[in-house]
Image (spheres, grey):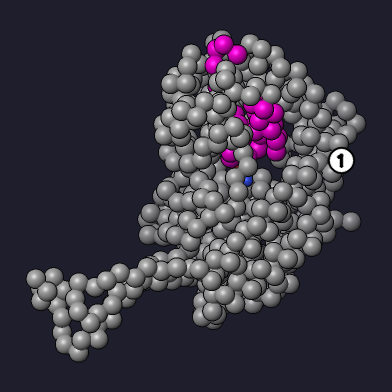
Amino acid sequence: MAETYKNYINGTWTDAIAGATFENRNPADHDDLLGTFPQSDAADVHAAAQAAADAYRTWRLMPAPKRGDILRKAGDILNQRKEELARAMTREMGKPVFETKGDVQEAIDTAYYSATETRRLFGYNAPSEMENKVNLSFRMPIGVCGIITAWNFPMAVPSWKILPALACGNTIVYKPSQDSPLSGNLLAEVLAEAGLPAGVFNVVHGAAECGSAIVEHPLIKVIGFTGSTSVGKHIASRCGDLNKKVSLEMGGKNAQIVMPDADLDLALEGVLWGAFGTTGQRCTATSRLILHENIHDDFVNRLITRAGKLRIGPGLDAATEMGPVINERQLARIEEYVRIGREEDGALCVIGGDRATDTPATARGWFFKPTIFIDVTRNMRIAREEIFGPVLSVLKARDLTEAIDILNDTPYGLSSSLYTSNVNDSFRAIRDIEAGITYINVPTIGAEAHMPFGGIKGTGNGHREGGWTVFDIFTEWKTVYIDYSGSLQRAQIDNY
Ligand code: UN1
């Protein structure tokens, strides 16, 4: 029997006011219906925003370390429920359980990190220009934050935004992706059990109409978004009009460079994980491999052999290394890019390129084979556009300078990786690569929760989640001057 799931508004589980619903199905088996979820509209968003605005009045006044105690408890509960949550997440979004466990772990790390930071939300003070006067500054919460996220990290990515925002004293209206709504409800359960007061965290499920209502709602003061570039740009322009603070985490076209002096076995493991981990569906996924020409042919041959051996199957099967893609629409998009790649002059598809639905375990799911194109050049669409699937484009470079030049030649700037044993080349690459994240001898995926995460160019809008930088998104600075001279001291006038 399929369950009927609800929104979580003001501490209560409720249906959408208009009563509409949508289905949530397992991408590894479309006959497996997890349940239905409310298809919310502006009225539901309004109820959630009102609840969050009411709760903000008292939540912002709770001492930050006390808020931290609740977040730490949430981390403990996530830890106790890790296996169970991971299995539920795998059933709704497909990646293998070892990966969804990592996803939960990233939320645990963020919970503990945010809890600790509540004792350390440092402000600055600075000397005054004048006698008998002090200058201070404090981080202040902003109010209700609207959080809209993707399905590929259904616990980690929302937690990166939500938990630090709560730590600062904000309240939340959260819209999970329609491909991972259950994970949103599980997070609500965990936060409620940890003792978060009613109204502080609200979940509304729905499609674009629901997302727009969040962006437009006057009580919602900040928008945190992870998802596609087209939706992100639209949100940014609306937030520009509405003068709303917005943090965007959008696409990537990340590359791994391999130099001849690298540990080539390590570089091979790196690209297999970076390109085909999470079925290539990470904003940090390796979608381009830039090989030095001297190692190109051998490396490609080894890569094809290994990619062909990856075990494709349902994520709940312990032997699976690569799960399905998220849904039929995304599968069609990947097929379309493979068609484009095949038609591009010179590019050659050397492995994969079609669905992997040829076994009983994969027949009812959205499975696609690991796919590799070689002889790709930088102007091809498969070298420039985000595909979000298990498709890797291989390019060739004469030297490191050309490799970095190719790496930088995309509209995006999220993650990047260089495999080399040359320390001088490493530091040149760190200086010259245009990306928010650069890995040396590490694949393009695997950011840690306590470090800034985000990208430049078309990937973001200058904000960084994760680490200490996320607090810049969810606070505003309050500057305070206190004059204890007992006289009017006019700045810039009486002191000069
Ligand atoms: C994403 O794909 O939106 O660095 C986030 C990584 C993960 C997070 C990915 N820790 O690959």
- 144 or 374: nearer the eye? 374
Residue 337, horizontal then vertical, whole percent:
61, 25
Say left or right for 397 vs 242. right
Give me the residue at 47% from left, 56% from top.
469
Residue 108, horizontal then vertical, whole percent:
68, 59
- Residue at mark 1: 317
Give me the residue at 10% from left, 76% from top.
494
Residue flagged by tag 1: what amino acid is it? Answer: Asp
Q: Residue 278 colored magenta?
A: yes
Quarter of the image for residue 135 reads: bottom left
Q: Residue 65 colored magenta?
A: no
Q: Is mark 1 within 8 Å of ligand 1?
A: no
Residue 274 in view (yes/no) = yes
Quarter of the picture holding the N terminus: bottom right
Residue 352, horizontal then vertical, whole percent:
73, 20
Residue 464 to residue 188: above or below? above
Residue 376 to residue 451: above or below? above
Q: What range of the chain is rendered magenta?
A: 266-295
Residue 324 to residue 290: above or below? below
Dividing the image into four quarters, tell me where ligand 1 lies. top right
